[in-house]
Structures are given as C-alpha cells and as structure tokens.
Amino acid sequence: MKAYQAVGVSVVVVKDNKICYSQTFGYNPDYNDSTLRKPIPDNGIYYIASVSKTFIGTAIMQLVEKKKLKLDDDVNQYLPFRVCNPHYPDVPITVRMLLCHRSTINDKQYGWNLDQINPEKNDKWQKCYNNEMPGKVFSYCNLNYSLLGAIIENVTQMRFDEYIDRYITSPLGLEASYNLTKIDSTRLVRSYMYDKRKKQFKPSGSVYNYQYVRNVLSDYHTGESAARLSPAGGMKISAAGLAKWMMLHMNYGHLDGKRIISKKSELAMWEPQGADRNYGLGFSHYDKVIRGVRLYGMTGGAHGIHSLFFFNPEEKYGFVVICNGCTSKAANGRQMNYEIVRALYKHFIK
C-alpha cells in the first residue's frame, strides 16, 4: 500500500470454504485531510466496478436454465430497438456475444443510457460498432452489459437490479445491490481518483449520488433504462460479501444449501469463448498472477476503485482485494492488487 500510495484496501482469504483471513487497511472518507480520516469499517460497502459483470452473467444463466432465453438467440428478440452491426447486417449479434465481449459493439459513445446505440434516437449509432464480424474478435465493452441488463428486464418484466436482489443476493443473504438507495450510506467506502497535476487524491462522488439514483428510479422505463443503474459496474457489496459470492462460484453455483445456478452453467461461464482471450461468460481465468496456478474470477477498475476476486475451485481457496484509490503508478490498480494476491497466497495458502 505504501509503494502505491493506496488510500485503503480490504482483503479476504478463503480456504476450505471458510474465511481464514479478513482485514481492512487505510482510511475513509478523506485521504487528504488528516483531521477527517476514519478507518474503513470492516463491513464497509464498496462499489466494485466490472466485478459486477459476474452478477449479470449469473442472472443470464439463470434465465437460460428457466428457458426464458437461449445464449445463441439474436438479441433483437429481447430489445425494443434494433441492434445490428452495419458492416455485417446479415450476421446476428447474440446474447452469448454480449456476455463474452465478441459483439463488435464498442464504448466510443458509452453513456448512462442506451440512446447512443438506438437508431431511432442517435443518427450516429453506427459508430457504436467496430468493422469486424460479430463473434470473431474479443473487444471489451461495457455497453454489452448495459444491453444485457435491458434483456433481463424485457424477459422478466422486472428491473434488472430487482431481479438480482430477488433471485441472487437475497437467497444468499448478501447485503448487496445495484440500487444505491438500498445501501446504508454510513457503510459506504468512498473512492478516490489521483490528480497527477496536483499530486493529491480527490473524491469520486459520481457513483455514490443518492439523489441521482432517486431521480433515475422516479423516471425508470423497464427494458430501456437499465444503463442508468450501470449493469456493467454498479454493484455495491462488502469485501466479506464478495468473498461469499466467490465461494458460491467456487462451489459450482451452490452454497449453504442454496443452488443459484447449475454446475453445467457455472462451468460454461468459465469456459473461454475464443482462442485469443481467456474470457468466458462474465468470468475469466488468470494463469500468470501466480506462477503455475490457474485462478478463475474477475477484475474491475473505475472511479478510483480497483477490485478483484480470484479462486481455485479444485483446491477450494480464493482471494478478494478491493482498493478505494491509489496513484497512477499502479497501472490502474491491477498490478498492486496482483501483488497483494501473491502475498496472500504465499502466507495463507502455499
């Protein structure tokens, strides 16, 4: 933490399906003013950025199991506007392609709604697509998951966050939600962006704006407004809660007597969808973090937050690391988090 000037870090180590180490370091809510520093609470709730995609992927797999949709269905079966790469108009974009970032959709016009890709609302919608055949090339894109949120809503006729609350987080007893108004503000761990010019941290308030969320919910249109609650990155959860979520997947979709998805669906989520990347259906695998060890999970980084959970399902251990801000030296925080994982592995697993 000192090497990367980290504001705060929470870590959890799981071994044999039990938390064997859990610790929080650093401060909240003001790093720059020592008079306002308070320790991050052990039950502090973080915005977890792209680790959130694992919740969307799990929700989609539930709907596949319920025969509400199929992975290789054309997404236009489930959306109120047409999604089609103008360079390959005869090649359908499928649910699977959105999940594994092979849709050819990009984030060049990414925003807090779906208007940018809606031909009826944006005359430059074509810019949302790369000139590549859908399904062939990996290209990471948050808009894919905004569309998946809308698909969940159109299939279930529920807001995507409410579906996840009802069918995923509540059965597991997780205090977690995409809906900020359901989160106790006193437990939120603020995130900090590093200003290289001023050489200091500044609070990133955009993801903790309660009034914004209230306004969104007051004018929410199911099936169209999903992007406004950020399916791609907007989940809020504690490090311990994320460890429990990790244990569910480490145990092939089952935990504490609750089965959330089948083992078949779980394994499908881990399976890379192309030879060029290790990315599956909301999950990835990581072979270079610890030499000679394959870990499954996901990383995230946005608005100052850097998060990850990695697990080894065969040997039943895993790690959660969440940082709420560090300097630009940290290569988006990922390198620091990888170093922390290696240290935790050395001292608690190896």
Image: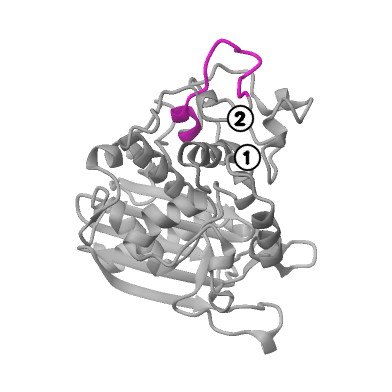
Q: In this view, does 246 lie above or below 151?
A: below
Look at label 2 and name its amino acid: Pro
Real-space CA distance between mark 1 and mark 2, rounded to the nearest whole angstrom: 8 Å
Q: Nearer the viewer, residue 133 or 321?
A: 133
State the count of labels.
Answer: 2
How has the structure been colored for display?
Answer: one colour
- Residue 80's label in the rendered image is 2
Name the residue located 68 percent from the left edge and 40 percent from the top edge: 110
Q: Can you say whether 332 is above or below 93 in the image?
A: below
Disc 1 to disc 2: CB gap under 8 Å: yes
Secondary element type, mark 1: loop
- Left or right of 297 in this view: 206: right
Magenta span: chief secondary structure = loop
Horizontal arrangement in the rendering, residue 245 relative to residue 129 (left or right): left
Q: In this view, does 340 lie above or below 52?
A: below
Query: Which range of residues does the magenta coloring cover?
Result: 82-99
Q: Which residue is drawn at 43% across and 41% down?
A: 282
Q: Name the residue under label 1.
A: 224
| x and y, in percent, of residue 245 in the image | 35, 58
Label 1: how many Cα within 10 Å (few below 14, some 14–19, many 20+):
many
Membership of 142 in magenta stretch? no
Residue 25 can be seen, yes or no: yes
Counting residues from the start of the chain, the first of labels 1 and 2 encountered is 2
Q: Where is residue 52 in the image (x, y as percent from the top left)?
A: 49, 52
Mark 2 falls on what kind of element? Answer: loop
| Amino acid at pointer 1 | Glu
The residue most toward the top is: 90
Left or right of residue 60, residue 201 in this image: right
Which of 246 and 308 lies nearest the eye of the viewer? 246
